[in-house]
Amino acid sequence: MKKFMDEDFLLQNDTAKRLYHQAAETMPILDYHNHLEPQVIYEDRCYPDIAEVWLGRDHYKWRAMRADGIGEDKITGKASGREKFDAWCAVMPDLIGNPLYHWTHLELKRYFGMDTIICPENADQIWEQTNAMLNTPEYSVRNLLRKMKVKTLCTTDDPLDDLHWHKLLKADFEIRVLPAFRPDPVLNIEKEGYLEYLGKLAELTGEDCGSWEGLKAALKKRMDHFAEQGCKLSDHALNGDFYAPADEAQIQKLLDQKKADQSLTISQLRQYRGAVLVFLASEYVKRGWAMQLHIGALRNNNSRMFAKLGADTGYDSTDDPMIAGQLNSLLDAMEQNAGVPKLILYSLNSKDYEVLATAAGNFQDGSLPGKIQLGSAWWFCDQKRGMEKQLDTLAEVGLLSRFVGMLTDSRSFLSFPRHEYFRRILCNKLGTWVENGEAPQDWTQLEKMVRNICYDNAVRYFEF
Ligand SMILES: O=C[C@H](O)[C@@H](O)[C@@H](O)[C@H](O)C(=O)O
């Protein structure tokens, strides 16, 4: 029987083991999508205890704790860090089969050198040993990133953001911390606060954001501001309604309708969002930016807890939208307008992987290998089976060799072993194909493919 999470964890044959240890293990990390706070990086904070760094902002863990019967007081409430940590240790034995069980043990190994099983009996030892380390300069946030060989990371930032901390970091930290342009508030015309947001955008840019031309001019100015801080990516979270054809005059009418406090129909919402996305895509083409589309999250479903805790607190679901027609029409509209930018397509529902990968294949224009990507397994799909399904679909319908690889998508500075988790799964897949005779044992080709997917493809693709 294999030892729990040993050095060959997830590597089921000799070819997989050789590929991981020879080609993947030492590769640096380019984390092109996460929700880390640039101010925390600039201030190079040390965390007071393991509870803060493990449980402070990670709603994946909050969700698991609730499911296991832990009261909110010991999750996001007023309980002490130790009480929350003890609650987490009580939950962990119940998480076998959940990726958090692997991720959390991997984090304990990689950052703290501990092979201890996380459970109530070991809580004291883990609390004392990790906190003793966390309170040393070696465990400052910047050193946590250095420890994992992170070379570049992209945060997720609102167009109104002054990027003050990114600016300071550029001159002060060897790891590149770059902003990503996330214009969701402009896309979400149906949401409360939309007009207020446009007001702030107008004030910041001096443009009349109540007009379609003014709104586009304002967004261009903010993209220029982001470009000055090295931005190379954008990101957009979309529900199931994101494209219907419309002409520019129609978009102005929709803006006027919203300003007159008249809600939009679903069809009008699709027209507005589609026009914004086609416009943004044309600007991204000019700037050479990559465009990420995160489709299919049904967010903030527990209205009582949303009112109490806000968004991204563990109350989201996978949606089941019908997106194939809209997606292909959106990409076709982009293509006819100013061309399709570098594009990474994610769905929170893995049923859509073939939809995304086949849509990608319709608009590859030969200008860049893998220009349009099936994005990595995202959020609820970000586990062993979900990652394998994404890798299989990309290989079967697209080009796995051109994949730009993993990202943490995390709010915790201890999440970077997720890249290792992905790399092990990738090497096991390739190793299995080789040992089954489904791929030649050409070490040069295989090791190059692994290094490309782990890091080199992303460096070329994003032009970092
Ligand atoms: O993975 C989960 C994420 O952190 C989730 O909370 C969202 O932030 C989502 O990724 C997004 O970028 O909109």
Image (cartoon, helix red, strand yellow):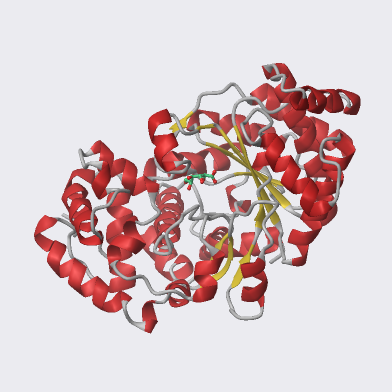
State which quarter of the image contains the C terminus: bottom right
- Determine the image quadrant of residue 15: bottom left
- Determine the image quadrant of residue 21: bottom left
Q: Is residue 341 left or right of residue 76?
A: right
State which quarter of the image contains the N terminus: bottom left
Q: Is residue 428 left or right of residue 255?
A: left
Query: Residue 96 at what x, y percent from top left?
Result: 22, 45
Front in this rendered view, residue 213 or 195: 195
Query: Residue 35 at what x, y percent from top left?
Result: 52, 55
Q: Residue at x 43, y 68 (%)?
A: 25
Query: Residue 362 at what x, y percent from top left?
Result: 74, 34
Query: Residue 200 at what x, y percent from top left?
Result: 73, 47
Q: Is residue 413 left or right of residue 240?
A: left
Quick one: which residue is furthest to the bottom in this view? 137
Q: Residue at x 85, y 51 (%)?
A: 206
Front in this rendered view, residue 170 or 104: 170
- Examine the rendering and report whether any part of residue 315 can be seen: no
Front in this rendered view, residue 456 or 273: 273
Q: Is residue 395 left or right of residue 146?
A: right
Residue 221 drawn above or below residue 166: above
